[in-house]
Image: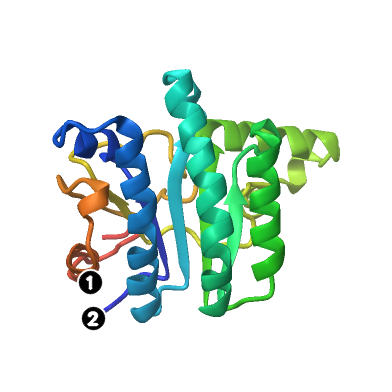
Amino acid sequence: MRLPQHVAIIMDGNGRWAKRRNWPRLAGHEAGVNRIRSVVTTLIDYHVQYLTLYGFSSENWNRPDEEVQGIFTLLEESIDREAAELHRQGVKMCHLGRLFELPSGVQAAIVRACNLTQNNTRMVLSFAFNYGGRIEIVDAARRLAEVKKPPAQIDEKVFASYLYSAGMPDVDLLIRTGGEIRISNFLLWQAAYAEYYFTAVLWPDFTPAQVKRALEAFSRRQRRFGGV
């Protein structure tokens, strides 16, 4: 089976998963966090080298404050809990987004995890948290302006080196759970030639069997990159 090098996932459906059970939305987010481990392990088994997860968009600040603060607490606790196991598995953790806008406890947990795992090579696991694709492109343009890069020296390769994802390959397979058919401002630059896989399965129910189904669908695609 031909496999992707870089998989990106929009982890959608936590709130609806909880609603169907008459549970609070935060229970759905907790179930979604708990789902991450099995998906990471499955993709490691398939030798996927890069995995990027969309956990919190720059637009998600508009959600109720109680939900946002609950998500931050879950993130901080789960990173501290899971970092050692991910390190043991050889996973390098990275953050994509505006780290400085997050609560100090979340920032510290992310920095600890990234520092602990920085030399690992089995998989690069990136969390897009407080992330937006348009903001990423704007931030890259600002950094180019700050270093006074001559316009004639700016091409796609140079521009990509100023993105949050600098040094990572483009996305091969972009998965969205939860039934919506859009990419919601996620990796707009990096997913320019990605294959998309949309499923109605809600993120907490996205089992290893569902991961395998997505990979099998990718393996059947003929990628042309704009060619005939």
> Is 5 on the left or on the right of 176, as rendered?
right
First-in-chain label (1 vs 2): 2
Instruction: Give the answer, above or below, for where 45 lies relative to 180.
Output: below
Kindly identify the residue that appears in the image at 20 percent across and 53 percent down.
205
**In-front residue for pair 216/61:** 61
Q: Can see residue 70?
A: yes
In the rendering, at what x and y percent does residue 66 appear? 45, 23
Q: Which residue is mark 1?
A: 219
Q: Secondary structure at mark 1?
A: helix
Instruction: Give the answer, above or below, for where 31 lies relative to 220.
Output: above
Q: Amino acid at mark 2?
A: Met
For residue 1, which numbered disc appears in the image? 2
Q: Residues within 10 Å of mark 2 (few under 14, many from 20)?
A: few
Q: Are marks 1 and 2 in contact (CB under 8 Å)?
A: yes
Q: Amino acid at mark 1?
A: Ser
Q: Secondary structure at mark 2?
A: loop
**In-front residue for pair 79/140:** 79
For residue 98, which numbered disc appears in the image? none
